[in-house]
Each structure stands twice: as structure tokens, then as C-alpha cells.
Image: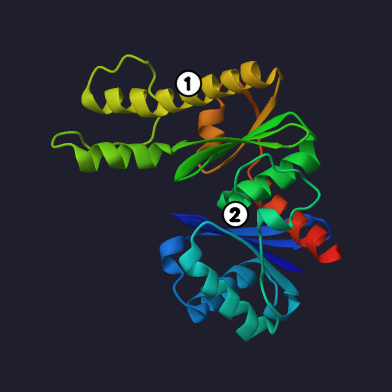
Amino acid sequence: MLLIVDVGNTQTVLGLWSNEKIIGRWRIGTINILTEDELLVHVNHFLDFFGFDFKSIEGVCVASVVPQLNSTFRYFSEKYLKHPALFVKAENVKWLKWRVKTLTEIGADRVANVIAAREFFGKDVVVVDFGTAITLDILTDVYEGGSILPGPRTAMKALFSSTAKLPFVDERIPSSSVGRDTPSNIQSGVMLGTILAIDGLISRYEAELSKKFKVVSTGGHGELLSKMSKQIIKHVPDLTLFGIATYHQKVLKR
């Protein structure tokens, strides 16, 4: 059984991969992971919940966008599993071509998403990952690049922290695009504005690349916001975890 880990800026998702499928997942705050021993406690709680023993873990594969935590996962794997953790890196993905200036700048979560998109949907795909930052990744015959914009919570926090009077409000989609009070004004601007920005970017991609894309989403706000999109056709909650597991299989086979 493989432990697959998606380390995000706000949340970390632990997954269990066995027999070509995800058999369990567990979400914790990234801030709660500081040392390899604390990580062990979280992993043991996770395994106990699904009725598995720690000894059943045969490997660890990590997609991390928080570099300062990489050593924690490295120490955890070496100390408790007696072998090194495998980290997702674009430069190890030799089966895909990357049309970018610097491979090392591509976030590990984006690499995993692109791997999974290729496996699930083939080519001419855009993946929208709703997280602390929203990433859009374009896959044709090659990886073309994409865009990054603030996630809804990040945008709301920025308004709250940078203004004297604007409150921090719930991340809800308002019933109308016309706000009648301050909270609904913010919800309209952030929630509806975000999805309109995503749809607009995808339209630009299609015009610039002369393609019609299949657009899929993943990530925390993906299910909610995807329903409002005219471009997104499918929400795949475990897309990143699937990509991490696929990376592990392909890299170790070489």
C-alpha cells in the first residue's frame, strides 16, 4: 500500500493507494505538520480510522508546494519506513513534454494534475485546481503552461487585511450578481468574479492555441464553483492524488 500526500499551503491531503485505486483519504491543516514525529501521529490516526496497520505502508510519494516541510516527510519516511520518500518533480516526468522556460518552477501539485489529466482525459485538457491559489494548466500534445490567480479565501483575506472597513465574509455564491450590502458585494466580486475570470482565461487559451479544451476541476472550492462555470465539464476531487500515485508507478518503473 502506498501513502500519497498532497501538501498544500493551507491543507494537506493524505491518501492510501492500493490495487490501482484510492482506498482512503484524510485532510489536515498543513500548519499541524511540523516534525516527523507529529506526522506519524496524524498518519496513525488516518490508518486507524480506515482499519489499516502502519506496517502495510510500502512507500511514500509526496507532491509538496511547501518546501520547508519536505525535510519532515523525508525524515518521516527514512525514520519510520526505512526508505526514502519520493517527491513529485517535473524533471522526472520524461513521458510528457513541457513547453516552459524552467521545469523546476512548476509546482508539484500542478505536475500531478497534468499527469492525471493525461491518464484520464488524453490531450486538449485544461485542469483548474481550486486552492489557496487557483492554478490553470493546459495540456495539448505537450504541457503548454497556464495561469495562477488568487483563490476565493485568499482574495477575501486580502480585502479584509488591506482595507479599514471591509469585513471577512463567508465564501458563498450570492443569489444575484448585484450586491445590496457589503457582504454580498464582496461575494459577488470574489466568487462570481473568480469563475468569470477562469471562463475568460479558458476562452483566451482556445483562441490563442486554436483548440477546444475539455475543462476539469479539482481542489477545495472546485465542486462549488465549477457548477457556475460555462467551461468546466467535470469535477474530479481526487485528481491530484491519482496523479501522485501514477507518478510513483511510472518513475520507479524506469
Above-or-below relation of 54 to 96: below
Mark 2, residue position: 104
Secondary structure of residue under mark 1:
helix
Above-or-below relation of 68 to 9: below
Residue 184, numbered label:
none
Tell whether 247 sits left or right of 172: right
Secondary structure of residue under mark 2:
helix
Residue 225: percent from left, percent from top: 51, 30
Question: Can the viewer see residue 178 in this picture?
Answer: yes
The amino acid type, in three-letter code, at marker 1 is Leu
Residue 203: percent from left, percent from top: 59, 18
Residue 196, numbered label:
1
> In the rendered image, which quarter contains the N terminus?
bottom right
Residue 68: percent from left, percent from top: 46, 67
Residue positioned 29% across, 18% down in the render: 179
Tell which tag, 1 or 2, sits nearer the viewer.
2
The amino acid type, in three-letter code, at marker 2 is Thr
Above-or-below relation of 127 to 242: above
Above-or-below relation of 149 to 89: above
